[in-house]
Structure formats: structure tokens, C-alpha cells
Amino acid sequence: MDRFKLLPVLLLSPLTVLGSHGDPYASDFLAIFFLLVGAALGAYLARKLNQPPVLGELIIGMVVGAALYQMGDAVAIAIRHNSEIEHVLHAHTADVTWEEAVHIGLEEAHLRPEMEAQLTEVLLQSDYRNIDMHARYTLLFSSMGVILLLFMVGLEIKTTEMVGMGRPAFILAIMGVILPFALGFLVSKLLFADMDTNTAIFIGATLGATSIGITARVFKDANALHLKESKLVLGAAVIDDILGLILLAIVTGLISSGGLDVTNILIILGKAVGFLIAIFLFEKYAIQWVINKFAIIARERTFLFFPISLLFFLAWSADAIGLATIVGAFAAGMVIQEKYFNNIKLDHQSIEDLVSPIEELFAPVFFVMMGFQVDIMSFMNTDVILLGLAMTAVAIIGKVAAGFFTEKGQNKWLIGVGLVPRGEVGLIFASIGKTTGVLDDHLFAVIIMVVILTTLLTPPMLMGIIKKMKA
């Protein structure tokens, strides 16, 4: 590989592998620079168009990723095909040479011929280890973003609040997950009868997610947060997040086990529920004691060090028992409360104030990298467009239908539409599907399409309903 790129590529590429005279991570610093600037630019343009910043970050990633991929940037290609490369790594054993593993692994990946040829060329380069190192460091930066994001979401939800949500919120949340899941699975199998059952299940699970941040912003802008419907939607979204993570744990477990089996489902469900119960018991009986002991060595830094340390430990713990790391990250946020640090923190400090700047640094990179991995050419495929539109319709219908399971006297349309956006939660599901290999480039593009359309359509629909209510 030519390590000295042409100037236009250098200026465009945050991932170009450059020559180095010392620090082997210098080009990764350049990558982070471009990723952060790209995220800031995307968010700025989105705000100018009155759209959520996450949408701008996603689209800027799609544009830059497509440009670099077409230019043949080796690191960009490695990132785009991270799941296919995992097939190659699994095929590489003591009895199988690297060249043989490349051909075996890519044959299993079923890529388009031109993509397979391009990826093969990258994998067989003499400095591929260097390329792989830069790709993995960039993806690590992105992964930090998603677990910090889920940690911040968890901070907004306390275990004690779960019990107080009430029966209407629980019913709404349950139906808001079940209906889109069932419709997504059925439509996937109807449109593509040969689709793998695990893939159809994963698509259904993705549609069960809700990104309440977009809805909450619309309610706030419309001065509608006081409405009983708004409070019900926000309350149900809390439970929806928990149910979505449990569903994700079950689905990823089924994929890794290789089949749909009642025993496997029960085992995975038991792990997910058991993990959350263990976290609840830890918070109730041990967390204060652990924090007090931690403070002996960390002193005044405990207020920052302990929450972040717990975040990483529980993310690892979740993965160790076969759950997604984001389940652990979410749980870490859920059990952390400022009252546990009363004897340590300063009066003006809050956990959100300390952790939020870190999350705001990493999380946008995750969304840029999600866009980066989208194969824009997939949108030229009729099947992708057809399935994307069908899944978007299902995503909307399933959530709106859930709104009709609420009590009489409430605006069921407002409640249902409030649950529609998938936003960052849909992207998190999509990233896991891409990483595990259950979503190929086309299906990954379908989920991105659903995220974009539901994010764009929800605000005007909500504003229209709210205006009618106030008229």
C-alpha cells in the first residue's frame, strides 16, 4: 500500500494511513480530528435544517465514507467490512494460511464480486496488520461513544422509578415493542421468503426500539411536556428501553447460538433478567459500601472515577455472560445516584455535568461511523428501497397501533406517534447487527433508511397533532 496519499485524499480522509516518524498512533489522532470535525459539521447543518443533530452526523458519515470507499482507502474498506473480516479471522488457523483464510472467509460472506475483489486486495497487502490496527482503534473510539450514550440514558432512569411508572405505561411499552417486532418479522418473511429466520427476528427487534430524545425535544419546543399524553409517552419510553435491551440480549444470544430453540431463549432471557436483578441487588445492598472503600484510594476523584469504572466493568460483565455490552452500560447508569456520593462530591457537582462532556466527545463519533459503514450503492437496489419503505411503514404502524392500547380520554394518535422515532437506538441495534454479521450491507442500509425516515417524519406529525389539540 502506498503510505503517502495524494493531497485531496489526505484532506478528505480521516482514516488515511500515513507515514510516521515515531508515534504509531499519530495517524489515529488525525482520524479522531476529522471524525470530531465531521460530527460537528453534520450536527450544525442538521440544526440549520431544524433536524436532530444525530441525523446530520449520520449523513456526514455516509458522504465521507462513500467518498473514501470509492477512492480505495484501505482503512475505510476495512471498517466497512469489519464483519466480513471476522469471517476471515475465524477461518485462519494453524492449518490454514492467511491467503487461504481470506478466500474461505470471503466466500462465506457472499459479497458482490467487485467488493470481494477490493477487500481481497486490502487483506493481502503486506502491511495489512497496520491497516487493521488503525481500523480497530477507530471502531474502539466509536464503541466508547455508544456505551457512554447508554450510560447517560441509564442515568435518567432509576430502578425505584420503574415500579412507579404505572400500569398504563407498562402496557404501552409492552405493546410498543411487541407490535413492531411481530410486524417487522412477518413483513420481512413475506417480502423475502428465503430470508434467514434469525435475520428476520433481528429486523423485528430493531423496529421495537424507540428513540425518545427526538420526541421529548418536540414536546419541549411545542410547550407540551405538561400534557398527560406526553408524560405517558416519556414514561413508557423508559420501560421501552429496558424491554428493548432485553429483547436485544435474547436476539443476539439466539444468533450466536445458531438457532431458534425454546431452551436457548429461556437461558438468554434468564441471563438478561438475572443480570438486571443482580444489578438491582448490588445497588440496594452493596453500592454504598463499595463507593466508600473506593473513595479511600481515589479520594476527591471518586465522583468521576467510580461511575466510569463501573460503566466499563459492567459492559465487560454483560459481554462475558453473552449479553450486549450496552446492557451493562445502561445498567451502570441506572444504579448510579448522586446521594451515594454526598460525603465526597462538591456541592455544585453533578454526575451529568462530569460525564456529559465525555459522552458528547465520543457519542457523535459513533453516529458518524454508523453512516460511514453504510453502502450508499445499496440504496440503488430496488429490493433495499422496497424493504426500507415497507419497514418504515411497519415501524410507524406498529408504534401508532400501540397508542390505541391506552386508556380512554387520551389522544391515542399523539401517544402512538410519540413512540415512532428510532434515532440513535435504531442505530445501536443496526451496529450490533452489522458487527455480528446478521445484517449484510443491504439490510444495514434498510435499517439506516428506517432511522432516517422515522426521524424526519415524526416531528411534523407530532406538531400537527399538538396544534389540533390546542386549536
Image (cartoon, grey):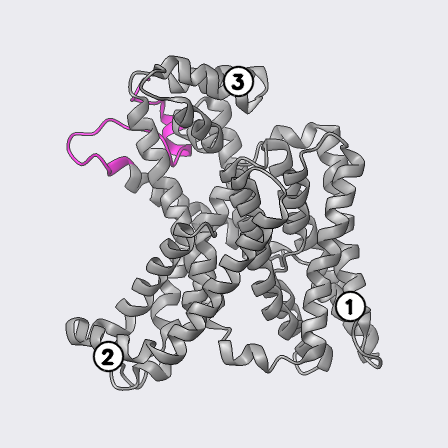
The answer, for residue 222, to whether it is visible in the render is no
Percent of width and height locating residue 300: 20, 76
Q: Is residue 376 left or right of residue 466?
A: left
Dot placed on the residue nearer the N-terminal end, 1 or 2: 2
Above or below, comparing residue 36 to residue 170 in the picture: above
Q: Nearer the viewer, mark 1 or mark 2?
A: 2
Percent of width and height locating residue 139: 40, 41
Mark 3, residues whose alpha carbon is within 10 Å: few (<14), some, or many (≥20)? some
Q: Is residue 353 left or right of residue 450?
A: left
- Residue 467: quarter of image: bottom right
Q: Secondary structure at mark 3?
A: helix
> Is the magenta region chiefly helix, strand or loop?
loop
Which numbered disc covers residue 403?
A: 1
The residue depicted at 27 percent of the width and 81 percent of the height is: 345
Which numbered disc covers residue 107?
A: 3
Region in magenta:
1-27
How many numbered marks are there?
A: 3
Q: Amino acid at mark 2?
A: Asn
Q: Amino acid at mark 1?
A: Gly
Above or below, comparing residue 281 to residue 211 in the picture: below
Disc 2 to disc 3, C-alpha distance: 55 Å
Q: Which residue is mark 2?
A: 292
Mark 2, residues whose alpha carbon is within 10 Å: few (<14), some, or many (≥20)? some
Percent of width and height locating residue 427: 56, 49
